[in-house]
Structure formats: C-alpha cells, structure tokens
Amino acid sequence: MKPIYILNGPNLNRLGKREPEIYGTTTLAEVEAWCREAAGERPVEFRQTNSEEKLIDWVHEAIDEGAGIIINPAAFTFTSLALLDALKMFKGPIIEFHISNIHRREPIYHNSYVSMTATTVMAGLGATGYPLAVKALERLIEEQRR
Ligand code: CA2
C-alpha cells in the first residue's frame, strides 16, 4: 500500500509553543501520533521543514511514491509558485490544510496559490483537524478524486 504524505511548512515545528490563542497547545509530535492512528494500516510519511526547497523535494517524492498528500504549507501557501508547480504534477488527491481559518485573518493570508490545485481545502478546525483530514484523504483516494 502506497503511503500518504503529510507535509508541514515553516515554523510549524513550534506548534504548541507560541500563539496558543490561534494555534492551540498541541505539539506537532502529538499531531503526528493522531495522524498515524487515524491512518490505520496506511503508511504515513509525516514531515516538517522550514525550507521551501526541501518541501518541493518531498512533493516530488510523493509524486513517485504517494497515494495522497495533506499539506500545510504555512507561509509558502501565499508566496510559492514553485510549490504550486510541484503540486500540479501530483496525480492523486491533495488536501490543503490550515490549523486556523486563514480567511478570518489579515488580508495577506487570503490568497492561497496552493488552493489553485488542491482537491480540498480545510481550515479553522485547529490541530484536531489533522486526523479528520487523514480520514477525508483516505476517502478521496478510494474515490480516486483529484
Ligand atoms: O493556520 C495554519 O495552519 C497556517 O498555515 C499556519 C502558518 C500561517 O502562515 C498560515 O497563515 C496559517 C504558520 C504559522 C506560524 O507558525 C506558528 C507555529 C506554531 C505556533 C505559532 C505559529
């Protein structure tokens, strides 16, 4: 069975350690454990990086190996055409995930490049939304929706 890729962008390694009023107190390690539990038998590649280059390399890896992608690109959501171009090459379903509701925030957080290619966008469920995204991705994989 092909793995799902859960990719997290810059600063999310600090999850649970700052701005708890927006992002909550859960750490990324806890999120990873929830995702693995939600995925059941499905292998999970759960990763975080502060580097745009690395994130794009991981999308390329997912293009070759992955059944689906959940990506929280953090600030790269609003800046990276290179990330958009990489995601466009992925044939399976993509869930763009944000902990906070980006549309309730400042206008700089409103224009997502990634949304132009995502199958689904989830935002505002908090960190507990990650395992829900895993369940949703499994259904999209079964339906082969892109
Ligand atoms: O809500 C999200 O998940 C975001 O993708 C998080 C990004 C932000 O740029 C997006 O607009 C929305 C990055 C948040 C900054 O990193 C933090 C990590 C941990 C705790 C506080 C901030």
Image: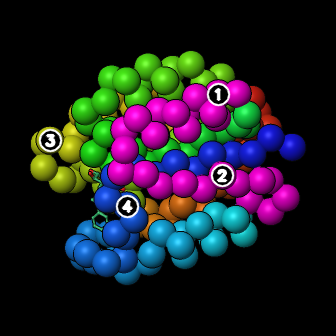
Residue position marked by numbered label 2 in the rendering: 45
Rendered location of residue 73, percent (x, y):
39, 44
Identify which residue is drawn at 64% across, 64% down: 35
Identify which residue is drawn at 58% across, 29% down: 60
Q: Quadrant of ligand 1?
A: bottom left
The alpha-carbon separation of the residues under discs 2 and 3 comes to: 30 Å
> Looking at mark 2, is its residue's CB closer than 8 Å to ligand 1?
no
**Residue 118 visible within the image:** no
The alpha-carbon separation of the residues under discs 3 and 1 comes to: 29 Å
Q: Which three-letter amino acid code belongs to the residue tagged 3?
A: Ile
Residue position marked by numbered label 4 in the rendering: 12
Question: Which mark is nearer the camera, 4 or 3?
Answer: 4
To which quarter of the image does residue 58 belong?
top right
Q: Are marks 4 and 1 in contact (CB under 8 Å)?
A: no
Q: Do the residues labelled 2 and 1 touch (CB within 8 Å)?
A: no
Residue position marked by numbered label 3 in the rendering: 108
Q: Nearer the viewer, residue 120 or 1?
A: 1
Question: Which mark is nearer the camera, 3 or 1?
Answer: 1
Start and end of the magenta stretch?
A: 39-64
Label 4 environment density (alpha carbons within 10 Å; few <14, some 14–19, many ≥20):
some
